[in-house]
Amino acid sequence: MSLPRRNGSLELGECTRNPGFQDDEESVADNSNAVPVETRESSAVKLETTEEEYTQIKPYAGMPKEVLLLYSTQARYRVPREILFWLTVACTLALVALTITVIALSPGCLSWWQASPVYQVYPRSFKDSDGDGVGDLKGVLQQLDHFQYLNIKSIWISPFYRSPMKDFGYDVEDFRDIDPLFGTMQDFDDLLAEMHNKGLKLIMDFIPNHTSDRHRWFNLSRTRDPEYSDYYVWTDCNATGPKPNNWVSIFGNSSWTYDEVRGQCYLHQFLKEQPDLNFRNPNVRKEIVDIIHFWLQKGVDGFRMDAVKHILEAAHLRDEPQVDPNKPPEEVTTEWDLYHDYTTSQLGLHDLLRGWRAEMESYSREPGRYRFMVSESYDYHEVDKTMMYYGTPQVKESDFPFNFYLLDLPQNTSGLWAQHLVHLWMSNMPKGKWANWVVGNHDRPRIASSAGPKYVKVINMLLLTLPGTPTTYYGEEIGMENINITDSQVQDPAGKYNTSLSRDPQRSPMQWSDDTNAGFNTKSNASWLPVHPDYSTVNVEAQKKDEGSVIAQYRLLNTLRQTELPLHRGWFCYVHADAHVFSYIRELDGLDQAFLMVLNFGDESVTTDFSSVNELPGQLEVLMSTNHINNGKVMQKSRIVTEAGEGLVIRYSTSTRFNPNHSKECYISEKACYLSVLDILYKC
Ligand code: GLC
Ligand code: MG
């Protein structure tokens, strides 16, 4: 498009033509057309002679450069221009600095392993797709909607490697293969792809301490293949003579077994079919790192590191001290008879774990692909040993070590006990670390059974309202209980030593519906362990229809946990604990809404008086009770009533925070302060 020209000048409508304007194009054209010299000269002359004339008029856009320059050097034009220039520079710099500060000071988003609970699938028992009575990977694939229904993103699946199943998968024959009982590598790939499609994360069980005695390495080691000879912990002994020392296996009796092929004893801290690897051998360390790479390259999102405290043993093989020095040595047969000074938590263990973490770190750099590590170590009263797995501010280790202390809740159902167990973790956890809570797993009786069904909901409420990541063992979301196992039904090797130690009761098939076998499989009625007889009422399908059910409460609480910032990442403050009630507040600076939890772990109904807690308003409304008919109830803060086993989530509005005046009773993982002027939270 071009504007029409008239008499060699642009048609500018009402605009006045600049008398000094010289159109280059025009002049070129004029030259070529041999325009009379006078015309050009006259305008040039005019420019020189009218300099004074121009200074009389104000400058305006479109003036010839020469004229503008006359003005631009004058102070009244130059100074504002320079001021404006430097102001622009300063503002730009200030904006950049502000952006950097806001980014640096903003509390980061929680990572996926913090935002969602971890759900443990015990694959033998979750869902059996082919009807052989044992759950499998295709079964897990079929049930992915269940996790979405619960709003759970992180799924830890207990081992499904190729295994002779002496310890149901914790005895690995090939770390790079899937056991046919669970499916194929293709099934695994399909499962992982579909999980990622649905935004779910897969955490694998990783078992570094031992392999199966059917592992290729063990076969080569017992035949003294020079490459593999030192892959396991061997020492001299003879078939009938005394054991090399008094060390005992976690499953009972000596942890040494004589191997006829090699003519020596090998160490096994678990079953004799689970020989301990020798981590003092660099080739073993390399093998394990290679396996970690193998699964990370496949895209798994994390590892649960099994039995880590057992990974190294003292090389000197001295006897461990007896707990009761007077006990005859031949009666020293269980884990509890010895202080495990030489078989657990040995020097070098954390270096190994930190090395593995570093490998995982190199796969964690893509956005959204953080690889998570949780470690399993039961350290009982030596909580500081557990905390070591958090690493140091300089060197990362586990994102968190499993916190098993709440498993002791049933020992004494009282508010004080609950607070004591929670406090054990909170007061020992290194500053700035992320807490976590476990109330059940495949090794411990279901808490619904040990605490009693009355406490199922309040325990889930505790789990989902404490700060940190909750872990839910399959079936806890519907309040499944242990099954009774007769001696002849025992499957677990631990139970073969002593029926009361069997872990079968907590491994019964998941109760999906009131169909045959509780919907665990549809193709047959086989199941590797009996289904709990309560399945006709305690099942996913039935509970989904009941707003007062365990699953309904679980789902709601989990949603609340993830949508309400104070529950998600806010302060956690103790408010009250007595023989019945444990009560705490979750709040976040800058938010008017806060939460008070009142959980009755006792065995009778009580009224709790919160009138001395000035930060609470006079009237409190129940957002959610484990007894759903109490939802919406309004109570005076001096008279908060809870039944035995009842828990309340109370949401209230306040402008007064509890934490500033009670810093000793309060914890937060990452402190955030509120800047009211900008209405933002910042790290402080
Ligand atoms: C862990 C597992 C347990 C297994 C043991 C040996 O403690 O949780 O089930 O028997 O390690 O691998
Ligand atoms: Mg070991």
Image: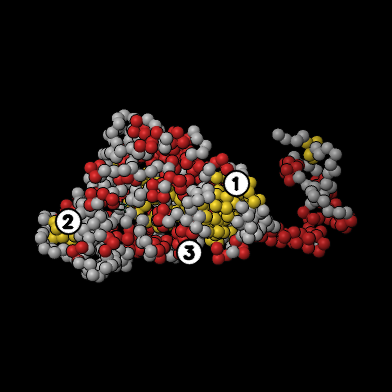
Q: Quadrant of the N terminus?
A: top right
The CA span between labels 2 and 3 is: 46 Å
Identify the residue shown where x is 35% and y is 51%.
444
Q: Residues within 10 Å of mark 3 (few under 14, many from 20)?
A: few
Tag on residue 473? Answer: none
The residue that appears at 79% across and 49% down in the rendered structure is: 62
Q: Residues within 10 Å of mark 1 (few under 14, many from 20)?
A: many
Q: Which mark is residue 221?
A: 2
N-terminal of the two: label 1 or label 3? 3
Q: Which residue is mark 1?
A: 622
In terms of secondary structure, where does tag 2 sit? helix
Which mark's residue is nearer the viewer, 1 or 2?
Answer: 1
Residue in view at x 50 percent, y 55 percent: 580
Instruction: Residue at 58%, 42% (x, y): give it.
Output: 631
**Colour mode?**
secondary structure
Instruction: Return the residue nearer the eye: 459 or 629.
Output: 629
Is residue 37 at least partly visible in the picture? yes
Between discs 1 and 2, the one toward the N terminus: 2
Position of residue 633 in the picture relative to residue 167 (left or right)? right
Tell me the amino acid under the disc marked 1: Val
Left or right, 469 with reference to 328:
right
Figure quadrant of the C terminus? bottom right
User: Which residue, given by chain and number where applicable, does mark 3 sit on?
Assistant: 427
The type of residue carrying mark 3 is Ser
Q: Is residue 21 left or right of residue 576?
A: right
Q: Indicate the amino acid at tag 2.
A: Ser
The location of residue 683, given as percent across then percent down, is 58, 60
Rendering quarter of residue 662: bottom right
The mark lying in front, picked from 1 and 3, is: 1
Foreground pick, 617 / 378: 617
